[in-house]
Image: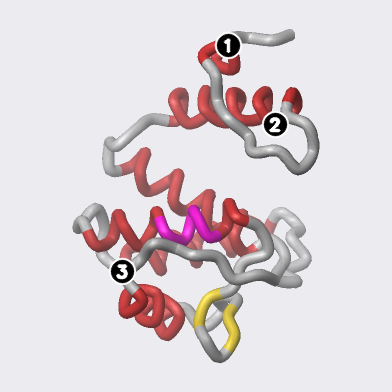
Amino acid sequence: MTRRDLSVDPKAARFAARALPDLPQDADGPVFREPWEAQAFAMTLALHERKMFTWPEWAATLADEIKRAQGAGDPDTGETYYRHWLNALERLVAEKGVTDAKTLARYQHAWDHAADRTPHGQPIELRPDDFHDHD
């Protein structure tokens, strides 16, 4: 696992690490396998700091997403933790009216398209044509 610059208040990151005992972490705090995990973590803390949701609401939504995944056969080895984190984040922003499922799916499709056309090791950048259907 790697550590990434979160651009998040270190106090908030420590709070999250204490509040979520299953959060992948070491003695210095949260750790991430890939940059998107750190970005999802940072977005969650930023939305919480802006009062988009309470921490108990976040923890309950994350726990529910983990339970759903386990019920669907997730082996719960820790490798999928941030996938559940992202699912919980997407669910909450949709429930709060920040966005909707259609917009989330549109962006997921665009990112998938952008990733497919991007050479390995290069930064993925969205372009307007990533938002069009590519059958």
Q: Quadrant of the C terminus?
A: top right
Furthest residue toward left: 51
Residue segment shown in magenta: 38-42
Which numbered circle lies on residue 129?
1
Question: If you read the primary sequence from the N terminus, does the residue marked by circle 1 or circle 2 appear first?
Answer: 2
Q: CA distance from mark 1 to mark 3?
A: 37 Å
Q: CA distance from mark 2 to mark 3?
A: 32 Å
Residue at x 61%, y 67% (from the top left corner): 32
SS type, badge 2: helix
Q: Quadrant of the N terminus?
A: bottom right
* Left or right, 27 with reference to 6: right
* Left or right, 41 with reference to 22: left
Residue type, numbered disc 3: Trp
* Left or right, 108 with reference to 122: left
SS type, badge 1: helix
Q: CA distance from mark 1 to mark 2?
A: 13 Å
Residue type, numbered disc 1: Asp
In contact (CB < 8 Å): disc 2 and disc 3: no
User: How many C-alpha atoms fall within 10 Å of the one at disc 2: few (<14), some, or many (≥20)?
Assistant: some
**Would residue 70 be visible to someone looking at this image?**
no
Q: Which residue is mark 2?
A: 115
Is residue 81 placed above or below 95 in the rendered structure?
below
